[in-house]
Amino acid sequence: MALNDRLFGVLMLVLAVAYGWGTTQFPEPFGGAEAVGPETFPKLLAVVLALTSLYLIVKPDPDNAWPPGRTWLELVIAVVVLVAYTLLLQPLGFVIATTLAVGTLCWRMGAAPLRAYLTGLVSGVVVFLLFTYALDLPLPWGVLSVLEAD
């Protein structure tokens, strides 16, 4: 059964390399090279993914097993939610898309629907405010763009 981990590790290593290469395609920031630019965080993610992938390849879990059918269904739902999130982020805006994505994922993990979507709303608003005002990294307003101040 260690083959499962090794196969997954190889696939994730390929993803890490592709993702890392993608970060090198970002345009150079205005004003020359900076120590920390828009590619820094994605590069860190690529390195962490590569290291954990190598660990899975070198030291797989001897007792791993494929999850049962219900777990596969939940994993497919999670992937569909995340793909929909990326597609809806620009048109709906960060807060609404995040509310829907986080709320749906929380609900699928067993939270009551009202609490799940309230958690999504609070998460979306807090992260939006943090990125937009504290970090000065604007996130998409989407349908809320009528509220956007110039």
Image (cartoon, grey):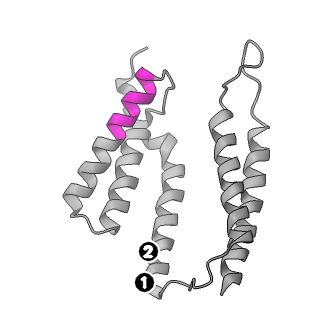
Which range of residues does the magenta coloring cover? 124-134
Q: Is residue 86 left or right of residue 92?
A: right
Dominant secondary structure of the residues highlighted in magenta in the image: helix
Q: Tag on residue 70? A: 1
Which residue shows up at 73% across the image and 63% down it?
Answer: 54
Query: Position of 73 compared to 121: left or right?
Result: right
Q: Residue 26 at x, y = what percent?
A: 74, 33
**Is 109 rendered above or below residue 98?**
below
Mark 1 neighbour class, 10 Å CA radius: few under 14, some 14 to 19, many 20 or more: few
Between residue 66 and residue 150, name the one nearer to us.
66
Could you tell me which secondary element the residue under label 1 belongs to?
helix
Please provide percent x and percent y for residue 34: 72, 19
Q: List x then y, in percent, for residue 15.
A: 72, 58
Tell me the amino acid under the disc marked 2.
Glu
Residue situated in front as seen by the camera: 29 or 93: 29
Which amino acid, mark 1? Arg
Identify the residue at horizontal 27%, vertical 53% (top origin): 117
Q: CA distance from mark 1 to mark 2?
A: 6 Å
Image point (77%, 19%), residue name: 33
Reply above or below: 112 against 145: below
In magenta stretch: residue 21: no
Label of residue 74 in the image: 2
| Circles 1, 2 touching at the beta carbon (< 8 Å) | yes
Residue 85 is left or right of residue 121, and the answer is: right
Q: Is residue 8 above or below residue 112?
A: below
**The C terminus lies in which quarter of the figure?**
top left
Is 133 colored magenta in this rendering?
A: yes
Which residue is found at the position 70% from the left and 22% from the top?
A: 35
Of residues 85 and 29, the one nearer the viewer is 29
